[in-house]
Amino acid sequence: MLLAKVAAVALALALGIAGPALTSTGEVALAATAPLRVMVWGGQPEINTYTKMIDAFSKAYPDTPVRLEPTTWGEYFNKLQVQIAGGNPPDIVLLNGAFIRDLAAQGALTDLNPFIKQYKFPLEDYWETHDILRVGGKMYALPLAGDVAGLYYNRSAFEMAGIGTPTANWKWDDLRQAARKLTVRAGDVTKRYGVIWDVAGNGQSSYINFLLQNGVRVLNETLTRSLLATEPAVEAIQYWTDIILRDGSAPRPNVLSAVSQAFLNEQAAMAYHLVPLPINLFQQAKFDWDIAPMPSGPKRRASEVNFIGFGITSGSRQKENAWKLLSFLVGEECQILFASLRQNLPAMRNAILTPAFADPKKPPRGLIPTLQVTMPHTYDLQFTRGWTEWTNLLGATMVRIAQGQVSVESGLREVSEKIDAVLRRVNAGK
């Protein structure tokens, strides 16, 4: 077979035809005129930045053409699946943990471990991504950017209330006491809540962290069974729920608008939110604000973390060139470019120290200290096949609990059984 490939290449060269060429690994590459296709999702600011990243690569490697194929987040996965099914996938794809497992199960992604080993890619220079981009020991993407949960606070509100601002030494009770004092009521109307967080959804910036900080996770280590009905889980969610229902220091679901907008409108003095996602929006604030690490729980300091990254499809016919582009896109030059958006945490550790990300002229002053305290204590979102399904079930149950429609113990027991059923189904036949 190899001799036939060599003969074909020799014939093409003899005839002056721009045909396929053998790479150092024996792979047949496409003609130089076939561009590497890179599929991404994002809004216009992200697309503009990806374009700059591709332009930087093209300047460094002018003989390797690249075509960026942007789309929206809502269209991305379906569009990618259609192209894979049609035998015409992009070479490089943007990936997150929510759907990487389904693609890996389809055999649609390339294991990057051989490339990482061959080219000695310095993963040690990047934040720990746990099993977000890795499945069954196989690395399917290199990290581009991520986020963690942190505590945003209205410094002006703290000063007016005569309360010390949050520090890295805060515990749960410090948060709860401050939230009570910062809550402002006029009769039956709450003018300002002490703290706000997302209730629905996967809980990355809210209730999941309370579980972690009490020493428990949603699933067991093998990701086959829910731990939500256990005593530590019930304790954590009961504490979280009491701040909402018993203290009235945090709003019930649907009382206020989005967390970021409620904080910006001074309807909440503290907000659990992803870092650094809303910091550009918060530059509009008419008050002094900052970020601190989330308070530690009874058992440990902990924060959920998530990352996105670039992978190579198994259908790519230019894997060597794709790796060259992939490693460039997550390399130092592009990390600084992507960090300039200030919407995501750059995956390369040192990139957080660049002025493009940690702008010394703009708040928050606590951005870098918060990341330095938080990042050594992170946990992933326990991605599984069927992850979106069971996290939707969990989010809906947390809304009912936060509304007082079901007790913490009953709600967690009920959703735990539902999650177990999902996991049994998606793991059947493994």
Image: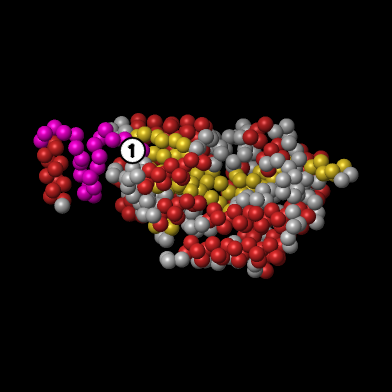
* Residue 3 magenta-highlighted: no
Residue at x 58%, y 62% (from the top left corner): 419
Of the residues shown, which amino acid type is indicated by label 1?
Leu
Report whether residue 78 is seen: yes
Say which of 135 and 171 sits in front: 135
**Residue 384 placed where, x, y %?**
50, 58
Indicate how the structure is coloured in the image.
secondary structure
Question: In terms of image quadrants, where is residue 15?
Answer: top left
Q: Is residue 166 visible?
A: no
Report the magenta residues as a range: 14-37
> Label 1: which residue?
36
Residue at far bottom of view: 231
Measured as percent of width and height from the top left, residue 116 is found at: 36, 52
Q: Residue at x 58, y 35 (%)?
A: 359
Left or right position of 296 against 378 = right
User: Above or below — where is 72 with respect to 300?
Assistant: above
Q: Nearer the viewer, residue 137 or 297?
A: 137
Q: Is residue 18 magenta?
A: yes
